[in-house]
Image: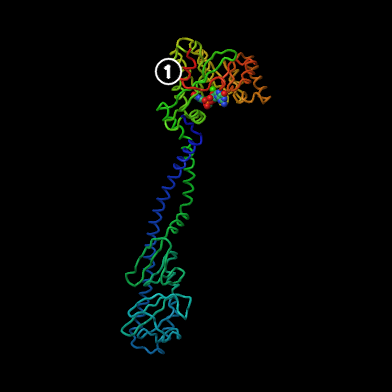
Amino acid sequence: MKLYVTFWNIRILHLLISVVVTILPIIFIIILLYFHTVSKLQNKAITSSKQSIKTINNLLTEIDHSATKLLNISNPACEIIEPALIKYTVTHTYIRTLNLTKDSIIYCSSFADANYRSTFLAKGELMHLFSNNDITPDRSFVYYHKTKGAWGVLIAIDGSYLAYLLNNEKNSFLVINENWLDIKGLAQSSRSFKGNPDQIEVSSNQYPFKIITVLSLTTYLEYMLEHYLLFLLILSLVMIPIGIKVYIQLPIHDIVKAMRHKQFIPYYQLIKISNSDQWSGVEVLIRWQHPKKGLIMPNEFISAIERSKHIIPFTLNLMEHVKNDFIKNLEIIPKGFHISINISPKHLQTTKLALDCEKFLQHFPKEHIQLTLEITEREIAQPTETAKKLFNLLQDLKVFISIDDFGTGHSSLSYLTSFKVDYIKIDQSFVSTLEDSLSSRYIINGIIDLANNLNIYIIAEGVENHSQKEYLTQHGVKYLQGYLFSKPTPIAELQKILAP
Ligand code: C2E
Ligand code: CA
Ligand code: CA
């Protein structure tokens, strides 16, 4: 069983291929940009963390010097040293309190209320990050505890100030032990992150803290949106016309392949002489015998070929095929048999077609075959000098010219006056509405009058019933073509019909 492929099957496949061709490079570039972003943000995190660590190290070294100096004063009495502690705190904005400790208990502080409190630090612990304490319940701080035996100096460093040293990197955290300080100065004892983000850790080699930068998919995508959106939009604007071009070219690609594999075969539709039982000839109608998709009708591919340069070799191949079909069956072909071949306006751009027709006719005994070229009125423009020259050459070769789909275009009249037209074919849209539409009958009658006056034969196409046949015959239409008489058939069927 022959399978007729719908127009949409092929179009959707081509559309899919074109969309893939358009989108694939964009996806590929997005993937490249993604990896570039990952590497860039990770390197940036390392550089920025190193800078922050350097600044925090310097700060801690300065604090350490101050602590060492205080420690070296042996057993200072609180009331003597307290003003110095207060002064130091006031002059260093990032210092919250400066305290002296003994056995991890504050015994003297720049902030009097702190006296006799525990440091809450483990023995020997140098630094600890606290989210708050009861004196400042909503402010984080870091204790720096320098000890010498039982004695110690405890410096509370403001959490917000340390957060400020994180270079405004919103994904960076200052981590001391397991406590995390973010850039807003908020501290938490642990942190959990959605997904499985990259954690870039850089540790200080002088003090017990590190900086962790958390880079998640969202971070990368946000960066890409901010930096590459315009580029991706421009890329899409470049790729869309390429995709459209591919979409236009794809049918041609398939068609050229099909031509190479000789998948185009001519079908023949017989044309009848209206007032007799004789056939006057055939119209050659191309079919694509697709190995997988079955028989494809010309409406699905012919306009793509006609728009391309391939229509010239395509028609030449077709003529070669037709010539072979008819040479093999010459004995059953009546003398003067018409063979009509459809041509496109591209054929009128050179005179080469005349040479091809000459070669075609040379294979047949003289006047056995009457070659006719059908050119559709819908496509033709004003006849050029080359076209006129071609038509003159064709006239010399006794090749007939037929204006197809007559009445549907607008340039036929200038053609009728510019060179000799032998046939006009009344378009099937008028024939099919003949019985119901008065205007169709007027148009048909008008075409018949015009043709009679210009000595041009008329072929009516698309004749499907007897009343159409009767009307056209009675009105003097000499040739009739349509399913009523014959459907387009392959050469084997034509042989059977023509065989005596
Ligand atoms: P066309 O030249 O107007 O051909 C007539 C079309 O009407 C053919 O369609 C034919 O099968 C169909 N037809 C014939 N009798 C009847 C009928 O009684 N009723 C109806 N409804 N239709 C009828 P087909 O074969 O599908 O060809 C479609 C068009 O493709 C042709 O229209 C022609 O413009 C183009 N074409 C076909 N073969 C070629 C070719 O080899 N070269 C070029 N350039 N164009 C071709
Ligand atoms: Ca035709
Ligand atoms: Ca037609």
Decide which of 196, 467 is in the foreground and name it: 467
Q: Quadrant of residue 461 in the image?
A: top right
Farthest residue, direction left? 149
Q: In which quarter of the image is ligand 2?
A: top right
Does residue 421 appear in the picture of this structure? no
Say above or below: 475 vs 151: above
Question: Visible in this render: residue 148?
Answer: yes
In the image, 228 versus 263, the foreground residue is: 263
Residue 452 location (% of width, % of height): 63, 14
Label 1: how many Cα within 10 Å (few below 14, some 14–19, many 20+): some
In the visual, does 50 lie left or right of 472?
left
Q: In the image, what residue occupies the spot 35% across and 74% down?
A: 61
Quadrant location of residue 50? bottom left
SS of the residue under disc 1? helix
Colouring of the image: rainbow
The percent coordinates of residue 468 (x first, y second) are: 62, 21
In this view, 270 is above or below 37: above
Q: Where does the image place residue 240, in percent across and percent down from the top left?
A: 49, 42
Kind of residue at badge 1: Asn
Q: How many marks?
A: 1
Q: Name the residue under label 1.
A: 324
Report x, y in % for residue 72.
33, 84
Q: In the image, 298: left or right of 116?
A: right
Residue nearest the observer in this picture, 499 or 458 = 499
Residue at 64% from the left image edge and 23% from the top image edge: 434
Q: Is mark 1 within 8 Å of ligand 1?
A: no
Q: In the rendered view, would you say 64 is above or below 54?
A: below
- In the rendered view, does 238 fall on the left or right side of 426? left
20 w.r.t. 444: above or below: below
